[in-house]
Amino acid sequence: MSVCQAVRVSAFALGVISVVLLNLYAVVLVVLRSRVYGVPLYRPMLLNVALSSLPVLLAIVFGLGLIVLTPVFGAITERLSGAGAVFLWAYLLTATVVWLLLFPNSVYLITELNFSHRSEVTPVPLWYDIVQTLALTLSGIANAVLSLGVVQLVYIVMVDAAGGGIPAGSWVFAAVIIVLGAVGVYLGRDLRLNSWDARHPGSLLRKLRAHLGQRGKALEAFGFVLTHALLIGLLYVPLFTLAWSALGSTAG
């Protein structure tokens, strides 16, 4: 491994470790809240952290799987002309769809800022709940940014590997994902739908149509998706650009 490659791997590993530590910190604060102040453990928060981490895990696993399987697909192509490319794109499409269905779970942690876990009479200081909930929300955003960053890099390598700066097509791809993620959060928060409800698209669409048909709901949904997507986008674009610049500098 060259020095530049080692620097890239180290930078990526540092990013992953930082996100993992932020998730662990959020979990520790949730558990300590119960132990220190003698209140019931709020298990939904722990479940949400686990679900929020899944897109990161899947993005990394699928990325590593692509590295491992690419030579296999190449060997298949040598035996059966074009077959390797078919298997490769089938793998990419399947991996992306599975990841996309779980991606909103990361962004969803923004909604924890409503403090629904906090009762009017509680021994837990407000400052503690603020830090705990903020750590939880930031861990979700970090998971979303990291997993999308990995997927966008795969997109660039496989689809739009032009020289120079970040390809415009990859930004369009990332923007679509961010908007779909915000839509997923809305469906989960207001319609109480989950990722696995995508197995029944007909029922999902009927529920959505009935919901948006109510007075004011369509405008509310638009505002929700727009504000959440802009928030993630404003955080994601500079972070991905900085990461890209860092990788580019090591390549030089």
Image (tube, grey):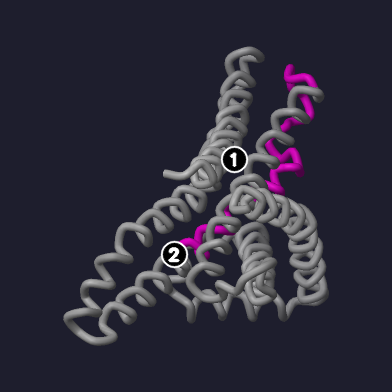
Give the amino acid at mark 1. Gly
Give the amino acid at mark 2. Val
From the image, tell me which residue sits under label 2: 98
Give the residue at x 51% y 58%.
102
Give the residue at x 60% y 56%.
149
**Which residue, as the protein is rendered here, is positioned at the far bottom?**
81
Say which quadrant the N terminus sits in.
Answer: top left
Q: Is residue 20 above or below residue 234?
A: above
Which of 27 and 237 lies nearest the eye of the viewer?
Answer: 237
Which of 210 and 23 lies nearest the eye of the viewer?
Answer: 23
From the image, tell me which residue sits under label 1: 15
Q: Is residue 137 above or below residue 33?
A: below
**Residue 92: quarter of image:** bottom left
Residue 44 lies in magenta, yes or no? no
Dot 2: few (<14), some (14–19), or many (≥20) neighbours within 10 Å?
some
Q: Which residues are magenta?
A: 98-125
The spot of residue 222 in percent (x, y) is: 78, 72
Dot 1: few (<14), some (14–19), or many (≥20) neighbours within 10 Å?
some
- Determine if residue 50 is in view: no
Distance from disc 2 to disc 1, alpha carbons, whole Å, reads: 23 Å
The spot of residue 138 in percent (x, y) is: 69, 40
The spot of residue 103 in percent (x, y) is: 55, 58
Q: What kind of element bears circle 1?
A: helix
Labelled disc at residue 175 = none
Q: What kind of element bears circle 2?
A: helix
The spot of residue 232 in percent (x, y) is: 73, 56
**Residue 216: quarter of image:** bottom right
The answer to whether residue 42 is left or right of residue 1 is right
- Determine if residue 91 is in view: yes
